[in-house]
Amino acid sequence: MMLSNSRSRLWASMVLLILGGSAQALAESLAPFEERLLSTATADGPIAESPVFARRGNAVAYCQELPDQTRIVHFGNSRSEPLAIASHLVLSDSPKPRLAYIESAAGEAPGERLFRVVCDGVPSPLLLMVLDGPLFDPVGEHLYYAAISRDHRRRLFVDGIPRIDQERQRIAFAGGGNDLAYAEQSRNRWHVVFGNYIGGDCDDISEIAISPDGQRVAYVGRIGDNSFVMCDGVRGKDCAAIWDLQWNASGKYCIYCAEAVNSQSGQVEWMIVRGQEVIKEDSFVCKLRSSADDSRMLYWKSVSQLPKRWRLVSEGRSLGESDSPGECSFSPDGTGVAWVEEIGKAKRVLHVDDWLSVEMAYVGSIVWDSEGKKVAFGALCGREFWWKVVPVMNKK
């Protein structure tokens, strides 16, 4: 893979933040709560990585691995030519879904690997590395990604065209709109640019989050060994690492996960920061979620290393365990929880409060209806890709 573990974690958080705090509300307005068979996998080979379902429930894209270890990408009735590596598939949330993904390509030097971003079947120029994205804007009109060009400059690309006035990385969109925030380098220092706002003077900027109303921006900066959140010009607590930065639903404060070293004991501490509140945990935490009414939080915490096990926690109460931290979300009123239990590498079970599904090969793209009475999701059952809908048993 071309991204390190930290970059992969950043990518996961950026997918969550692409629509800012209004991602859930926008997805609810898009998704039809009507069950349908979307596609059936061909006999070319095994599915190479998790499929991607459009949150309208109208499309799926997936990779298959061929006997020579190359991959082909399927989307609707189309398929790519065999690729050395295809990864990071993303679909637009538009009436007519669009597909983008990263593919690898051989460089000129022996053993050199370069990369392209492919959108609508059209590849970008060769790149040294993809730093962030690809991401579609909220209406699926334009594609954005940050990458290192072959001249070793970090650039923001829009529809494959580089913006070359400054070196740039990290991207985020305002909720429900096309306002773009990004990190920009000037004189070897990184700053956040959002409209007329320019903030920060950092060695690096790793995450950016825009408030639900699209008016404010927060980011994770690093100076030396210290990472911190800058929100409304106020610098938060110094930590060893920070991830899952986001605004709460009302946009009053930021929430995030952090790792710090106790100055007295020297022990590593994990915590969740919610505005001015700090919730300490005894192990690594991730995939932080906040309910729409700001009353509850949801997150995964590591509970054992061998074998690796994770526990889903809400307000100090365990909701269940999984081999890996799966997708999870609150209902619109914050009273219900839907989450995916991952069993090994090839089995998934959807939990909606006390109800649970049969085992499936994949479950993802969970969407609640506006009243919290139905949950829709993408599922791989055998070789069939379904958009499924289930009623919430405690909501009449």
Image (tube, rainbow, N blue to C red):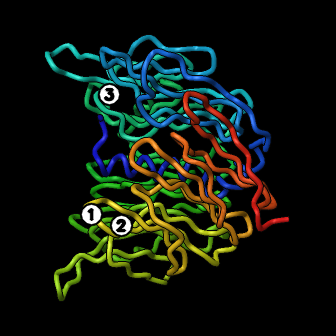
Residue underneath mark 2: 302
- Quadrant in the rendering for residue 88: top left
Query: The residue under label 2 is which amino acid type?
Result: Ser
Answer few, some or many: residues within 10 Å of disc 2's Cα (few below 14, many 20 plus, some between 14 and 19). Answer: many
Q: Locate residue 204, reporting x and y percent.
A: 31, 55
Query: The residue under label 3 is which amino acid type?
Result: Ser
Q: Locate residue 352, reporting x and y percent.
A: 65, 60
Give the secondary structure at mark 3. loop
Q: Locate residue 307, reporting x and y percent.
A: 28, 60
Answer few, some or many: residues within 10 Å of disc 3's Cα (few below 14, many 20 plus, some between 14 and 19). Answer: some
Give the secondary structure at mark 2. strand
Circle 1/circle 2 CB separation < 8 Å: yes
Per the model, the C-alpha gap separating discs 3 and 1 is 39 Å
Q: Locate residue 118, reporting x and y percent.
A: 47, 22
Above or below for 162 versus 171: above
Towards the viewer: 352 or 89: 352
